[in-house]
Every structure is written in structure tokens, then in C-alpha cells.
Amino acid sequence: MATPPLQGVRVISLAEQYPGPYATLLLSDLGADVIMVERPGSGDPARRFEGLFASFCRGKRSVVLDLKSAQGHQDFLQLIDGADVVIEGFRPGVMDRLQLGERQLLERRPDLIYVSISAFGQTGPMAQVVGHDLSIQASLGMLNVPIGGESRRDVPMLPMADIASAMFAAIGVVSALFARQQGAKGQRIDVAMFDSLMSWMTPFLVPPANGLPTRTLPPLDPGYGIFLTRDQQQITLSIAGEDAMWNALCHLLGLTEYASLNEQQREARALEIDIPLRRQLALWDYAPLYKALEEKGIAFGPVVALSQVAQLPQVQARQMMRSDPQSKDSQTYVGQPLQFNHGIFDLKTGVPALGEHNEQLMRPKAP
């Protein structure tokens, strides 16, 4: 097994729900020692969703502190004294009111990396607006639902603003650690879900801002879609402008009259082409079609039910679903996706109980 690159780095996390816990999961899987500071009584609100909490909080340690009390305040500062990074996910101003904000902590620890994750960032007219993922996506033009069509069915499955901000937070931490290694002091990193998702939307925003044509996504190419086979299985084709792939597909399916069309011509005739394309694909059973597309180098993929993803041979080969060898209940988790020198890292531990590590981490200092 490879040695995790962040081994020896300690992260104190005050972030709850989704973005902060996912960011610290990424850091933990890269070797960081992540200590969650949870509220008394209930802990992270995500604990009420056992599966969600387990997904993000394996491999971490948990302490319970009342940051509003003098003892909790002092105990938190004790944790900071041994930490490299603190990540918080409160509304702007909350940490300052607790006297644990950027200024106070960086005065105490000038080399500390202080990360704030919030909906709209620490500045600007929307800084105090409370917003979860759906509201962020809507604010960035991603939910252009026709009037009268608003319903729960229009809500995206994947919380992209949460994920984007988590990944940028992790990138920010790693960058700041590198800068500190080069001689820089601590850093203050302001991560907005809004900004993070806006960055992901770069190809949709830059062209119109500069009067340039926008690349349509998803592509209008008729070879880009979901199709049904003769044995009633689904398969995707994902030809996105590749003329050579389209030509190979047409010859495979006996649609030679369309084989020489380039991307622009295919898009212009997409509705016309769709009918014979689906008809010819429906003459194939799934298994031989899979083999033929693979051999021809045509972009495609299976359509897999969510419940079957963990059993995919590709998932097993890449060891992306893994059990914690130290866990009493042998739970299975999604593994860390980066491979360093062709190696993967061991999972560290399972999911901590609320306050499980208070005694271990909050021992009184020796006089």
C-alpha cells in the first residue's frame, strides 16, 4: 500500500452536513488526521441520516465541545494548538461571535490554515443569505424550469454546489500546505458554494460574456444518447463530434448513407437520423453490441442501476468499494479515487461514535 501524502497533517473540522464533511473525507483519505468537533447532544445534524453520515465520516475522530462555554472554548483552542488546518461551515460572522474567528486563531497560530465554507462567501450582498445546494444551482441559472413546471421532480439528484465547494476546499488546503512548506505563513481561505459551482460552469459563462458561440451541452449529435437493445437492455452512445467514430458506427449498423456526415450536418438532421439509428440498434442484443462497440473504439457505456454499481467488475478491479479492516461491523465504503505510484491507501477506521475521542484528545496538559 502507498503512503498517504498528507500523513502527519491534522485537520479540525467544525463543518457539518455535506460540503465540509466531504472535503475533510478527501483530506482524511489522503492521510490527514481529521477531528470533528460536534455540538453537544445531537452532534452533526447529518447523524440523523445514518447512511449519509457514515459515507462522509469514516476514518475521522469525534469530540463533543460546547463552544459557547468557557471550558469548550478553551478545549477548542487546545485542539488548535496541535492542528494545521481548521475548517468551518457556519454562516459568516458566527465564528467571530464565538471569538474563534480568523483573526483570533491566526493571532494564536500564525501558520494555521483557516478555511470557511459558506453558501455565497464571506463578502458581497448575499453573504448572509442562507442557501443549500438547490438554491445555489437556481441562483446560477441551472434550473430553468418552465413556469408552472416547478415540482420535486425538477430537483437534481446530485448536489453539485456541495460537491464543487468541497473539492475546492480540499484543493485550497493542499495548496496552502504546499505554500507553507515553501515558507509562507498561514492562509485564510474563503470557499463559497456559489463561486465553486460557477467555476464548474465556465464553458457556459465565458463564451456569452465575450460574444463567442457556446458549445451546446449535452451535445446535439444523434450519436449521443440512451438507446434500447433487442433484449430490452439500455446502452449509451456518447459520440460528441467525433466524425471517425460516427463513420464506424454507421458502417457497423448498416447506416452507410449517413456515414459521411460531419458533426454540423448530423446535428442539423438529428431528428431524421434518430429513428433509423434506434431501429438498427434495436436489432442487436446487448452483449454482442457491447463487444462490437468496444472493438470498434466507439464511445459507449452500459446503463447501470444505482443498486448494481458496487458489483460492477470495473469497480471491483479498481477497488473503489472497500471494507474497513479495523471495523467491528465490516462496513463497506467508497474508496479514495487517486492512485499514487499505482497504489491505494488503506481505509483507516470506521465511523466514530459521538464524542468517542474526547478522552483521548482532551486529556489535561501536564503542568
Image: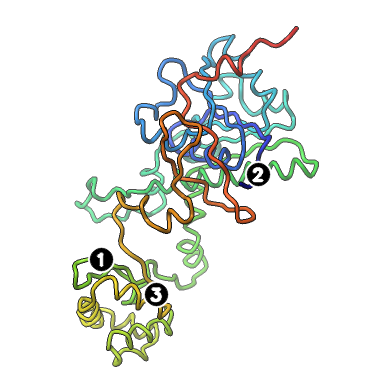
Mark 2 lies on residue:
3
For the residues labelled 2 and 3, the Cα–Cα distance comes to 35 Å
| Residue 270 lies in quadrant | bottom left
Q: How many marks?
A: 3
Q: Residues within 10 Å of mark 1 (few under 14, many from 20)?
A: some
Residue 294's tag is 3
Point out the tag, 2 or 3, that comes first from the N-terminus: 2
Position of the C terminus, as image quadrant, is top right
Residue sitting at x 32%, y 85%: 252
Relative image position of residue 155 (x, y in whole percent): 29, 48
Residue 234's tag is 1
Pick the residue in front: 214 or 281.
Answer: 281
Q: Nearer the viewer, mark 2 or mark 1?
A: 2
Q: Does residue 352 appear to the left or right of 185 in the view shown?
A: left
Q: Does residue 257 appear to the left or right of 13 in the view shown?
A: left
Pick the residue in front: 90 or 63.
Answer: 63
Please tell me whether residue 219 is drawn above or below residue 195 in the rendered image. below
Q: Secondary structure at mark 3?
A: helix
Q: Secondary structure at mark 1?
A: strand
Residue 251's tag is none
